[in-house]
Image (cartoon, helix red, strand yellow):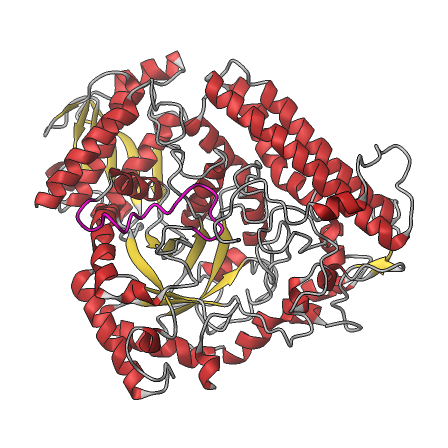
Amino acid sequence: MKRRLVRKLLFGAAFICLLSTQAFAQDGYRMWLSYDLIENPDKLSEYREMINYVSIPLSSPTLEAAGEELTPGLSGLLGEDIATTNQMQNGTIVVGTPGTSDLIAGLSLDDELNQLGPEGYFIEHRVVDGNHLMIIASNEEIGVLYGVFAFLRQLQTLQDLEGLSLKSSPKVEFRVVNHWDNLDRLVERGYAGLSLWDWGSLPHYEDPRYVDYARINASVGINATAINNVNADPKILTDQFLTKVAALADVFRPYGIQTFLSVSFNSPVDIGGLETADPLNPDVADWWESKVDEIYEKIPDFGGFLVKADSEGQPGPHGYGRTHAEGANMLADALAPHDGIVFWRAFVYDPAQTDRFREAYDEFVPLDGQFADNVILQVKNGPIDFQPREPFSPLFGAMEETNTMIELQVTQEYFGFDLHLAYMGPLFTEALTSDTYAKGEGSTVARVVDGSLFGYEHTGMAGVINPGSDRNWTGHPFVQSSWYSFGRLAWDHTLTAEEIAEEWIQMTYSTDEEFIEPVKEMMMMSRDAGVNYRMPIGLTHLYAQGHHYGPAPWTADLPRPDWTAVYYHKADENGVGFDRTATGSNAVDQYQEPVASRFRDLNRISDDYLLWFHHVSWDYEMNTGRPLWNELVHKYYSGVEQVREMQNLWNRTEGLIGSQRFEEVKSLLEIQERDAIHWRNACILYFQSVNNLPIPNGYEAPDHTLDYYKALEHTKYVPDPWYN
């Protein structure tokens, strides 16, 4: 009780600060939960007429959280105090479940609520006995909280309230964010400061920021968080750290967020005193069962484990001659009595494999049907590693008897860290809407991961977010839009990237159409711009090793060939691209028909994926009519021009938002233009050195030599604590 009171007092102080319009109002801390006074006078007047009271039972921590969000949020948006009531008065927002609110129970909502499940919500404008009411109802308290956030979103985006009727339930069971935070507070592939988790002060001091983190996630329906690096330190499972994790779980719980931990497969050896971590060894199984029991004593709603095994040096069952299924199932058996889940990552690759593209499919498809029901295979959207554009992983649609979820990356490991603007909504929807044809046309990746295609026992989507201690959480302010996009799509994958972008702009910056339209256009082109000036036409893996920031298409002679760039582009004087057809690695054969036929046919494959699957000559005629070399040059120069167009679009917004926010993004776009030119020039000069072809007429000449750009390979413009 004392901890909850302290948390509430701290939250209240933080929220008052957040609602202030001066010191912190425009620094990005509040993300899309700003709740500033509505700018549109007509909508403001309409809302003030329809909203006068709130009736919400504060009978549990989750309902308290809903009340702490709704009443201050309404006051901020409407610019006036909102009274509470226990009666159905005109202009009342009636909030709750049939079991917690007599008013909700009296509205006879069984037909509506029966469709929603435990997390869904029902929002409707009704006239009852002459009183205009707004109803926010759910079967469970967490659904009420989601409904409150959804209702506030309606106001933030200036939706009509009269006649409003919404029913919404999540498409997948686990909507989980992954953190790659280390126990020393450095964040692998994190570009926004130190880890959010201050292990030194936990469990005695719970930073109010932890509450705001939970609010941010719950506002888009995220219901799980894996708080530590998949390259896991075994010490996370010691009593010292589990006590700290339990304190975080206490903060997250009212917001419906389950806590998961990434674990090292060799933990029984590293911290348990055993001589082996063999998953079939009874002593190992007993150790994990005991450890799991210990965790649930501290965290009764603990979610389970996220595991990276036999990948990039991480230990796994292969070290003991066992399969991934045997390793995952041993952990699943330990968690099963507590209804815990194992997220088992499919990110594996073997240096002996001739094509890294093939590895995950070849490794896991033979194991289909061997995984326990409480294991979910966590598969990256593409077959390599979060590259700017990848074909969908062939594992989607190939694992009919194995729960399979998708892993997406919000943190901009391959999109310019915290310095480039690259809205990931189009990448996420491109992956989700890809058709696997596993059961004929319409067998999209989204239908695989939501379980509707194969009837999975458990479903999920994971997003690697990696926020940090920077005041605005994400470094570049527009990385917030990708976090928002992930959450919205995890809840409802039928949304479009464009409508999500518009929501985020309205909630984060402005509802002024003069601002929304150019910024939305800028966001929607930003991902393609990033592809074009980095790795167009299906090129991939051209970045500098280690930090992954700048270009290095010349990289060769590393300890493993699949760490080099030349392994992937295979450029020579005759052509460029990785042959994955029958004359090469035949990875194309991992796809279902007609996808495989389309990828293997030069006359049918999209230009976007050409060099993923084919080694083609430099004079090969593209769909545009240009030879490949000319098209490649055109794409690289187009990427730079797209960044310049993004600058022009942003400049149109000057004066429509605060000068500090405007100037920040303007400066970042100038940095992005600089880096886009660097990428363009370095890559074109390198490929020119291979094919000895001139840069076509009409393009500005690179301002430096290839040797100049090679000398910059190990230069990082921003710190990355993982690379030193």
Q: From this view, report whether residue 591 is shown above or below residue 255.
A: below
Predominant secondary structure, magenta span:
loop
Residue 654 location, x and y as percent? 55, 16
Judge from the rendering whether residue 472 lies leftward or rightward of residue 677; answer left or right: left
Residue under the point 76% across and 43% down: 708
On the rendered structure, is 682 left or right of 476?
right
**Is residue 106 in view from this perspective?**
no
Q: Is residue 574 magenta?
A: no
The image quarter containing residue 260 is: bottom left
Identify which residue is drawn at 13% across, 39% down: 6
Relative to 78, 366 lies left or right: right
Q: Quadrant of residue 633?
A: top right
Q: Is residue 560 above or below residue 537?
A: below
Q: Nearer the viewer, residue 502 or 381?
A: 381
Position of 416 relative to 539 (above/below): above
Residue 62 coordinates in the image, percent (x, y): 19, 44
What are the residue bounds of the magenta stretch?
A: 187-205
Residue at (22, 61) in percent of width and height = 240
Residue 519 visible to an observer of this rendering: yes
Q: Position of residue 657 (x, y in %)?
A: 47, 18
In this view, the residue in front, 451 or 489, is 489
Q: Residue furthest left?
A: 1
Q: How many marks on residues? A: 0
Residue at (50%, 35%) from the top-left corner? 476
Q: Is residue 9 left or right of residue 404?
A: left
Out of 299 and 23, give the one closest to the viewer: 23
